[in-house]
Amino acid sequence: MLASMLINRTCCADIRSVNTGWGILRGEVVSPGTEDLPPVAQYLGVPYGVAPTGQYRFNMAISAAKWTNAAKDARQLGSVCTQAGLPELSVNKAFEYTSAQKFDYIHKLLPRLKQQSEDCLYLNLYVPERLEVTIKETLLPVLVIVHGDDYGWNSGNPYNGTILAAHGQIIVITLNYRLGVFGFLGRCESSSCQGNSGISDLVSALKMLSGILPAFGGDPRAVTLLGWGSGASLVSLLMASPLTQPSRRLFQRAILLDGTALAPWAITTNPQPFFMQLGEKLGCASKNASSQFNSGVEGIVRCMQEKPPEAVSKAAQKIEVPTFLSAFAPIVDGQLIPNRPKVSFSSEFGSLFREIDLLVGTTTHPAHQFLSNEDLKNGLSAEKREKIFRTLVRNLYDFHRSEIYASIVNEYTDWDNPQNNPKTIRNGVLGALSDVLYNAPLVETLRMHSSDDVRAQGKTFMFVFGHETRSWNSEQPNSGVRGSLSGDHIPYILGYPLMKGDKENRLYDGFSMEDKEEKFHSIAWPQFNQPNREAYLEITDRPRIKNYYRNAQVGFWTGLVPQLQHAGKEGAGIPNEHHLLPKHFAKETFFGRVRPYGPFANEPFPPPPMPPSPPPKDIKKPTTASFPETTPSSSAVPVTGAYYGTYLTYIIAIGTGMLLLNICVLIMICRQCDKTRNSKKKLQLQYQTYASNHHAPTGDMNFGLNSPLQEPLLSASHKQSASALRSGVSPSCPRHGRAAIALQGSRGNSVVSGGTGPPPLEEIQV
């Protein structure tokens, strides 16, 4: 079924040329193969970015140069990006860790993934002919497909949009972006991180499309992004990215299928260990350098840029990635991704995320690919369930692991049938993995998008694709796994009919999101955030509306488990050994690969400050941006040194500051004391500067400096006389100066005249 959707080209009818802002494109008009659908013009292999080779490898995308000198032929698909993380392809090994359905899906895509190259930044446009002459002047809506499944492999080339474009009267666009280590090589230096080159490819493509879509009859104000798996995670990140709003939003609607940035596997929180491991395997870094968190990052990158792409891919595949997590995935860099998704999606950050119309969809068992084909067919033992849950808890959580593990076992045990039946255990494990990795993050994304706080204009819808495919039923008729698996909805979105022979009953018919209150085949489709309900559409042979999808399980993963984590993180005096699982270091007790024992804070740096978020256009109540919470930085060195070294640095810095403050205060006190002492001496000298001369031969006033013992004072009989002043008083004294001058004058006259003066003066020390 999927193979028929991948390649759908017939003999060319004619050549179609379009003059765009980048130059003239020459495409090909093909027929969808049915008489009731109009022809579609295909423009394939249109470059939107410079080849990211050499010094451009691992860096942000650069827009492609214009081809104004000559028309560009756009009738052949371009190369796909290097498949750095392609899964195991041999049957025996593949069936040990994934399902037969996943294996078949990969092999159907392989023929279109063989032509690999770093020069892969191309997009493909499928433009339909108009069905009615009267609407030729109107612009067509646009659907941009961001392929997914995994960050390390796949391409937009295998997905032909001819039928979807013809039937839906929309312009369908598929594209390639860098994958794995080439698109998401995260590395941090000083206080900043970078490594989202794959997301920059998508932004570059959207910017180019906003300029050339009118030439194809497309409406740049009616662009919808559709992604599944890792592609859905990238679309959700772009919804909250400030770079998608230069003057106006680069897209207005989003469809997320089986993926969101809130999922545990969607973001790499600590990329530095994987970066250093890759450098060691390529010979660009030594093991000693790996113990230094920021040692020579630029030099290591330059060395990696000189290596052949095949060598880089092989080295990346040798890196052991913890099960349920991602090594080369988007990181918080402060630019393309301004903050952690849970912060960026919240109302405190602003309205960017919630201005976009959002449709979220999932399947019945989105995590089935984590179980082997044998486990899906015959069931699981209790011992293997224990291993899977232990690995899940160790890799995803840091605190109260034993309590979380016991809670998961209790939550996903069928207490109506508590016997250790292998298929019952399998159903519980399949439900737990689907809930924690897909369902709970998707419902949380819907709730944050439809929050009543500072309500934006974006609409919110949800559907669950429960249609059972015939291929799975024929392969595993007695497995007991009922419902849909991940990827089952993709062919139906691309135009495959839900029921054989029903050409009109296609899944994408309800995804226009133009004039809601929505309908899906005459069924009213309410928005997700209805009063007292979380409505969703269940798509089966008989579609219907339901409420609160797996609400109890979603509450377990978004309520109880985070509370246990928070209690352990904030708990004081709890030894680290308490947070370890029993037999924590015994590898045989785990499933797959486990995260190495390391620090609880799994982030190399606090996220950079967020850029200002524009306020909502149609909301009076302003929004404010919430700055990220800072966490102690950790490094690739052992946990004890990194964890306690930061606090020791803080203590030394505070102690040094207090010492300097005390020294400054002491110096100020000493200076004040010296200033007071000098002032007193100056005042004493001022009153002792001039003294009366009692034996002057003439009437001239000559004041000399007398010591306190030599200073003549009045006798005791004259102490009460108003005119009796001390001869030691200075004439400059503002209070007694004039009296002193007059007294000295009278004394001089009495000496000259030889008259009898006052009684002899006594010398009294002051």
Image (cartoon, grey):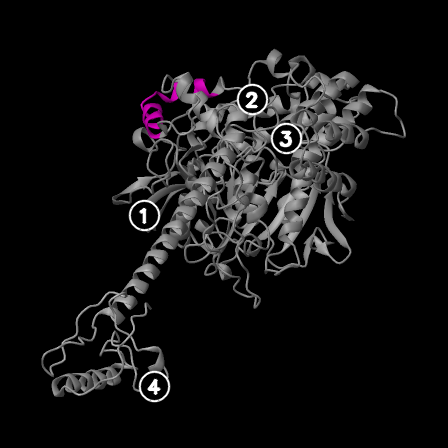
679 shown above or below 188: below
Check the picture and name the quadrant holding the N terminus.
top right
Mark number displayed over residue 107: 2
Q: Name the residue under label 1.
A: 22
Mark number displayed over residue 721: 4
Badge 1 or badge 3: first in the primary sequence? 1
Residue toward you, 671 or 433 = 671
Q: What residue type is labelled 3?
A: Leu
Q: Name the residue under label 3.
A: 396
Foreground mark, 1 or 4, reads 4
Work out whether residue 439 can be spotted: yes
Residue toward you, 722 or 623 = 722
Magenta residues, start to end? 298-316
Q: Is mark 2 on a helix, strand or loop?
A: helix
Q: Which amino acid does label 4 sit on?
A: Ser
Residue 752 place in picture, x, y as percent: 12, 85
Q: Which amino acid does label 2 sit on?
A: His
Q: Which image quarter: residue 720? A: bottom left
Packing grade of label 1 (10 A; few <14, some 14-19, many >=20) is some
Badge 1 or badge 4: first in the primary sequence? 1
- What residue sits 56% from the left and 44% below the top? 341
Q: Which image quarter: residue 597? A: top right
Badge 1 or badge 2: first in the primary sequence? 1
Residue 301 part of the magenta-drawn span: yes
308 shown above or below 131: above
Residue 348 part of the magenta-drawn span: no
Residue 640 place in picture, x, y as percent: 54, 25
Foreground mark, 2 or 4, reads 4
Foreground mark, 3 or 2, reads 3
